[in-house]
Amino acid sequence: MDAGGLRGSSNGMGGGLWVVVVLDAVTASILLIAGMAKAVSPGQLGQALAELPVVRNGVSTGAVRGLAGVEIATALLLPVPPVRVVAAVAAGVLGLGFVGAGLAGWLGGSTTACGCFGSRGGRPLGPVNVAAGVLVIVSAAVTVRAPAAADPAHYFRICVVGIALATLCLCLWTHRGLIRELTRPLSSSR
Amino acid sequence: MLDIVFGCVLLAVIAALVLLFAMFGELASRMPAERRPERSADVYPLEDARLGVEPGRWPESLAGVSGATGPSIVLVLSTACTTCDDVAAQVSGELDQGGAGDLAVVVSTGDEERAWTFIDRYGLRRLPHHIDDKGQWVGDEFNVRMSPTAMVFQSGRLHSAMVFQDVNALRETVSVPKGVL
């Protein structure tokens, strides 16, 4: 990814920067959905973390909500050109946390559902968290290394639209069970 | 400038949508609990309990209860009682909403591993908790041999002991609102 390639097009959006936009959109959508889920029901993750041998004293509701706030703020700041590198570093640190928690749950044989990413299923901390964490770390590394866009306003516009689309898709996928339930005809209806 | 406003509005709308889905998910996860048969709101005193007694020894984890000047509630739950599961779920729900921090829990069990599983299932590590082997501490010190039982302490002494099923009904009986103790 060279600076010339990134700045090659008329609007400052070279092919390399499109990759950054896509990765940022996916990362922001993951963080936004994970953060909102933690903010609304912090107890489930608190229980799952309390099961880990490295977290013997449990995690308070306030701490989980605080983490949710950091995730949401990071997601919303990723498309803002002046702070995108800082937000990417924060995303990388959060990604490391996902990987750490996922590995601890995976290796420790965690059985408590974590409610991760707003999922209503009974999946505990494990490989999915590791995979999401790795994706976030890779995305953060790419964003940090990429040079700034020649047209920050255009970059912001494209990035926001990308985040909106990615978040919408991920949100619908995560809550597909709920959508299915809500759209299912009632047993008494004809 | 208009583009930036549009971008911010779009982000706010999408965040609100995600929040809405998260709240629907949370609401849906609570529905099965609401379909359960109604639990009894009866709270009645445990006649055999040794009221007014100051225990000879306090478990280390309940030191906060022994030193409290105001009333404190200690719930006695057992791994062998199904009502205790329901009570623990109610307490867990309150903890998730940021309440119930005024309670402490004694888990009576014959198997320590089952007790830890019980505590972890309901996230009771968030409260002062003590695993009571075969219920010896509550039995020997207070003659409390039923669960779920709520023991109310005042200045380290057992003020009252009540058998209950509904935590809200218990709080109304004790007349201490959430988070005040």
Image (spheres, coloured by chain):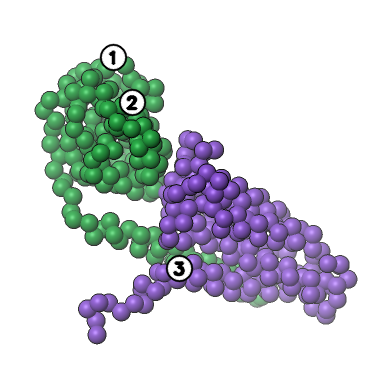
Chain colours: A purple, B green
Compared to residue A3, the image places residue B36 above or below, namely above
Question: Seen in the image, is B149 located left or right of residue A15?
Answer: left
In the picture, residue A163 is in which quadrant? bottom right
Which circle, 1 or 2, is nearer the viewer? 1
**Residue under pointer 2:** B65
Question: Seen in the image, is A60 located left or right of residue B94?
Answer: right
From the viewer's side, name the closer residue of B10 and B158. B158
- Residue furthest left in the image: B47
Which amino acid lies under the numbered mark 1 shown in the image of this protein?
Gly
The answer, for residue B59, to whether it is visible in the render is yes
From the viewer's side, name the closer residue of B142 and B158. B142
Image x and y of residue B73, in percent: 27, 32
Determine the residue positioned at 28% across, 44% down.
B85
| Label 1 neighbour load within 10 Å: few <14, some 14-19, many 20+ | few
Residue B56 got which mark?
Answer: 1
Image x and y of residue B147, in percent: 21, 35
Sequence-wise first label, 1 or 2: 1
Kind of element beneath mark 2: helix
Which circle, 2 or 3, is nearer the viewer? 3
Which amino acid lies under the numbered mark 3 shown in the image of this protein?
His
Determine the residue positioned at 43% across, 60% down.
A121
- Looking at the rendering, in which quadrant would you find the N terminus of chain B? bottom right
The chain that hosts pointer 1 is B
Question: Seen in the image, is B14 located left or right of residue B128?
Answer: right
**Residue under pointer 3:** A175
Image x and y of residue B95, in percent: 37, 44
- Residue furthest bottom in the image: A190
